Amino acid sequence: MTFDELLREHGPALWRVIASYAPPGAERDDLGQEVLVAVWQALPRFRSESSPRSFVLRIAHNRGLSHAWRRARQAPSGSELPELADPGPGADERAVAHERVELFLRHLRALPLGQRQVLALSLEGLPHAEIAAIAGITPENVAVRLGRAREALRRSIAEEESA
């Protein structure tokens, strides 16, 4: 499978994973480039021991985890600047949808890394066994982390909506 084929087939999933680790803007763009370079460099070593989807998502999550660890060691940089809505036709609807997605992603990024990782992979439709292989944990632990992540996400969103 070529790099272009991988991106055509799994690009949207890659960008969703990247969004689960980095806020919009330059930071997300940088992480995206880092992930794409890593996929490009690792592609010659791909031996079809897993699905191409698992291969690229594992790389994306490993880079995302490294990014999150680096970011956690840095001092807080203050509040994030909001993105401006597109002024074109239908911008209101796109802005509302974008705002909801970013709200969800902000809460997702606030989860502990282990919970964030399994929830993001689950949202991509991966079965517990495949998530376990990517994360290096057991399928049972995937189920536990998913349950905790979903509950924490529900609580976090509900607290913000009630405030």
Image (cartoon, rainbow, N blue to C red):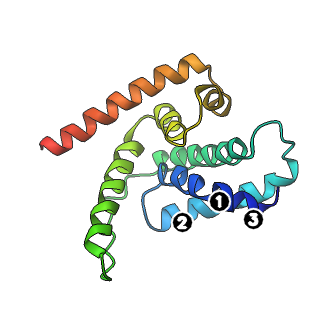
Residue placed at 55% from the left, 57% from the top? Answer: 15
Q: Secondary structure at mark 2?
A: helix
Q: What is the crowding at mark 3: few (fewer than 14 residues within 10 Å), some, or many (at least 20)? A: few
At 54% from the left and 19% from the top, the residue drawn is 141
Work out how far the residue at label 2 is from the one at label 3, CA to CA, in angstroms: 19 Å
The answer to whether residue 27 is above or below residue 130 is: below
Which one is earlier in the sequence, the residue at label 2 or at label 3? 3
Camera-near label (2 vs 3) is 3
Inspect the image, locate mark 3, and give the three-letter code of the amino acid beneath it: Asp
Q: Position of residue 41 (x, y in %)?
A: 80, 57
Q: Position of residue 63 (x, y in %)?
A: 62, 48
Mark 1 to mark 2 CA distance (whole Å): 9 Å
Residue at 75 percent across and 41 percent down: it is: 51
Q: Are marks 1 and 2 in contact (CB under 8 Å)?
A: no
Q: Which residue is mark 3?
A: 4
Give the residue type that dot 1 points to: Glu
The N terminus appears in which quarter of the rendering?
Answer: bottom right
Residue 120 is situated, as x and y percent measured from the top left of the image, at 50, 41
Q: Nearer the viewer, residue 123 or 112?
A: 123
Mark 3 and mark 2 in contact (Cβ < 8 Å)? no
Label 3: element kind? helix
What amino acid type is highlighted by mark number 2? Asp
Label annotation for residue 29: 2
Picture disc at residue 34: 1
For disc 2, the neighbor class at 10 Å (few under 14, some 14 to 19, many from 20) is some
Q: Earlier in the sequence, mark 3 or mark 1?
A: 3
